[in-house]
Amino acid sequence: MHAILRRGRPERFIVPVLILAGWEAFSRSGALPPALLPAPSAVAWAWLDWVFGIDGNTQSYSGRWIFDVMASFWRVAAGFAIATAMGVTLGVAIGWSRFIEVLIEPTLQTLRPIPPVSWIPLAIIWFGIADKPAIFLVFLGAFFPILLNTIHGVKTCDRNLIRAGAMVGGSQHQLLRFIVVPAALPSIFAGLRIGVGSAWMLTVTAEMVAVKSGVGYVLWDSYYFLRYDIVIAAMASIGLLGFLSDLMIQAVARHMLRWQQGTTLQGVEG
Amino acid sequence: MATIEISGVSKIFKDAKRKADVTALSNVSFSVKRNELLCLLGPSGCGKSTLLNMIAGFDRPTTGTVKVDGQVITAPGADRGVVFQQPNLMPWLPVWENVAFHLKLRGAQKAQRRHEAQRYIDLVGLTGFENHFPAELSGGMNQRVGIARALLMNPAVILMDEPFGALDEQTRMDMQNELISIWERHKGTIVFVTHGIDEALTLGTHVAVMSARPGRIAEIIPLDLPRPRDITSPRFNDVKRHILDLLRHEPAAAPSPLQTADPS
């Protein structure tokens, strides 16, 4: 987080400012009707009202942003937590035990190419129209990246470290807990970062189809009312939330993997 | 009383890919008595690391038995401390946690682990580096951590597999002196694998000279040279000449396809 929020380095703002300025100029030029491509200033105005309820231009959404965000955030958090618990547990088991790998990996690898969104019909039949189908979809999206990265991390654990652990008297269970899992943590965190991205994608998808609240619902609903400024504000909100969740995971990783600092490119940078 | 007994040990590696079996060790027998420091000396590919791995319990003999204190070895255990060629420290643990890793596995409290670790950190001369991570230390310092980790278990036997091989000459001589001074103060049985004649003659109470393909013991030479040993003294050179003769009768240890299957 420090790397991103650190003061100085003004060059980080060059590209966003150029994009926004170009977009603003293009919108005002009249090449397209303003209703089809609202200018950034119009989006900002709608966004501000959505967040703070300034002049009510977003009507029923005015001042409701935090509630919409929390609705989406809670679904992401729940689905992601379940995916993390299951992905890491199963990944460690598959990576460590040849028997478990043979037993369940083929099934998982068959399920993996099925796009999570194709589960939407079944998710609605099974869980109805509420939080549950969204949480289920988030889980599906985050589970596989976490699982695969955990398996990779466990399988690439240095055999010599396990020997060293056996030499100091470690049982199989202890070797797994005190050596294999810590050694797999860098891979596991890579999986968590990919997983949280999928989680936001899928919660928004689910909210467009199967749920009546959250940022994704606002986005789709505004589309029906031809409020493209709110659509874009919702898109920007999702981007911001995904970015912040990734920063959170990076901060946890930086703390848990502080032993890597100075040994990796990322460590030197952070 | 012999602490380590190797009797009739052979090791054949199956090489399925090339349909050729490699005999790494052929009918090796010897014993190491309590408080001896035996150096296993030989060219690469003579099976000395394989032999050490069998005493450590990482590897099993194809025929014959390896016993430590009368027990047949079938698995690694904390009664045998191993110092590896590479330090093999847990990179996520600071120095003191690496040294006390054995106690962590035994469920000891943090305060006790910290206290015990300090003794051995001081012993190997790493005072002040307790909270460093391995990546922040030099190779020689990491190797000291590995030695402290093995010593802390207070094992009956310490097995060292070319532990100073990756160090520069100066650091290696310092580490050899330190190892001898630790061993003289604390005693204990040590098996030390090396391919350096000077190193074997500087450290050992005995040197077991091995020959390659198939690996066997050519001769076990007891050393009664006074310590600290002078590697330029005439007596040192007499023994060295004798060992060179033994090794010269060997075909030169040129790389052969067979050697690739031998992990030593």
Image: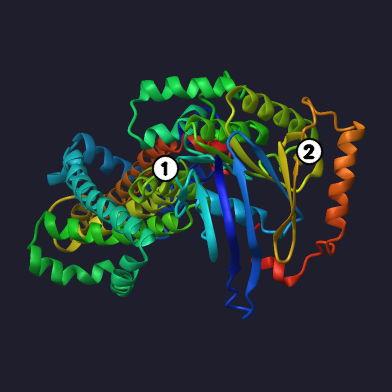
Amino acid marked by disc 2: Leu
Residue in the foreground of this view, choosing between B9 and A44 = B9
Indicate which disc residue B208 carries. none
Q: Residue furthest bottom?
A: B19
Q: Are marks 1 and 2 in contact (CB under 8 Å)?
A: no
For residue A118, above or below residue B51: below
Total marks shown come to: 2
Residue in the foreground of this view, choosing between A226 and A28 = A226
Which quadrant does the N terminus of chain A fall into? top left
Q: Is residue A221 visible?
A: no
* Crowding near the residue tagged with mark 2, few <14, some 14–19, many ≥20 C-alpha atoms within 10 Å: many
Residue located 66% across and 57% down the image? B264
Does residue A133 appear left or right of residue B149 in this picture? left
**Is label 1 in a helix, a strand or a loop?**
loop
Does residue A32 appear left or right of residue B130 in this picture? left
Residue in the foreground of this view, choosing between B164 and A104 = B164
The answer for which chain carries disc 1 is A
Does residue A234 appear left or right of residue B78 in this picture? left
Spot occupied by residue A229 in the image (x, y as percentages of width and height) = 29, 51
Mark 2, residue position? B201
In the rendered image, which quarter is residue B221 located in?
A: top right
In the rendered image, which quarter is residue B19 located in?
A: bottom right
* Crowding near the residue tagged with mark 1, few <14, some 14–19, many ≥20 C-alpha atoms within 10 Å: many
The answer for which chain carries disc 2 is B
Mark 1, residue position? A169
The Cα–Cα distance between marks 1 and 2, rounded to whole angstroms, is: 32 Å
For the residues carrying marks 1 and 2, which lies nearer the camera in this image? 2
Q: Residue furthest right?
A: B234
